[in-house]
Amino acid sequence: MLLSILSIIITVYILIELNQKLRIHSPLKLKPIEFKKNTFGSKQKYTVLIKVTNTHKKMEVMIPFLKVNPQLIGINKDDLINIHTIIKPHHPDHEEQKSDYWTAYILKSNKSTFVQIEVTYELKNTAINNLKCIWLDIKWGNYGPFGSFTRYDGFVLPNYSNTFKNIIPNNNLVEPIKTHILGTLDDPITILKSYIPKDYLPTDIITIGESPLAIMQGKYIDFRSINVGPIARLLCLGFHPTSSLATACGMQTLINISGPTRVIISCLAGGLFKSIGVKGVFYRLAGEQARLIDDITGTTPPYDKSIVLGPIDSQSFCTKASKELQVNVAVVDVNDLGRVKILSTSNIQNKSIIKHALQSNPAGNANQQTPIVLIRQKEINSRSHDS
């Protein structure tokens, strides 16, 4: 009897894992690597280079099409005089293409190709200062042994001309710092250098939100690219409607990271312990990303249509940033309910100070564009005044 039950469990486990392995999945990775902005009279031109890499050791994958839809964030269509987009493939093994037609391209295993995108636009003078950024919405095809499907990626072309430099008053203990809309073309440590005040003290604490850091690391997924399975549709029903795991796409994202069996077992164990009054077991078992995933609408536009994951190795970031800037650095997750979670910090002794300072959520969770907060202790201010 015991042997039969064990056989059934093993069979179910194999079927669940096999179903996950056989789901549509492409080894291609797309990311922007550099950009520049030029001004020609009243016209602005962004030129960005993206890199597409085939991470598979053997599989060849074809790219039958690639389309780009630039979206200007912060203005309405009446403010836009004109806009023009040009896509130029720079395949290392092909001659330069002269027409606008995208020729289907085979990307061999462990190889990369490049695509240059040019966006030229003209705005009314009254709208120039309203432009927050340009969001490049990319729709592209992947074709190979897994079948054929359409993928969606996007990233921000930052508008550095619409940035906000901050002067921190000495009598202000907690100061949110406004930035441009951050993206994968921004380096996190460089961003801290650019926006924290020049007269900061080595005893100050600089915090950055976990979602903005993850976004700069490219850890977000367009919901349209997520292939949802029946397990995700079933499991998401057991979560509170406000949870990021209460949607099929949010749950499928976690399953793709942690594996279906682990998530199923975590749900069963979590439900069992919750019935006897013990909460949080699911999140302890399902992996760190279970707590950190933000579903769509949980992040500042234009990331409101993306599922944002937790950042990569936040402790290494804090250590490196603190050493380079000579200031205390922490990565935090804060909400309007007074919940302050410190993912990582360069100085563990600052935890109680950070939690107390951020309980009111000074950075906000809407469209404030204040991912960085400077914390200055009162007694430090007093000593600096006396000197």
Image (spheres, rainbow, N blue to C red):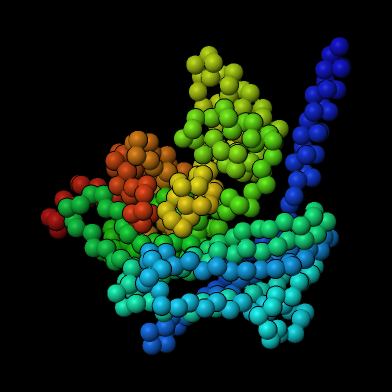
Q: Which residue is drawn at the image coordinates 55% and 68% (left, top)?
A: 69
Quadrant position of residue 350: top left
Q: Looking at the image, which residue is at 68% across and 34% down?
A: 231
Residue 330 vs residue 248: left or right?
left
Q: Is residue 122 above or below residue 138?
A: below
* Between 196 and 352, the one nearer to me in the picture: 196
Relative placement, left or right, of 57 versus 133 is right
Q: Residue furthest top?
A: 1
**Which image quarter is the C terminus in?**
bottom left
Residue found 78% across the figure and 30% down from its top: 13
Direction from residue 272 to residue 348 in the image, left or right: left
Relative height, residue 175 to residue 325 (above, below): above
Residue 199 image offset from top left, x and y in percent: 26, 64
Quarter of the image with the N terminus is: top right
Residue 324 vs residue 310, the one in the foreground? 310
Residue 58 image position (x, y, % from top left): 84, 60
- Can residue 118 be seen at all in this image of the molecule? yes
Between 229 and 328, the residue placed more toward the observer is 229
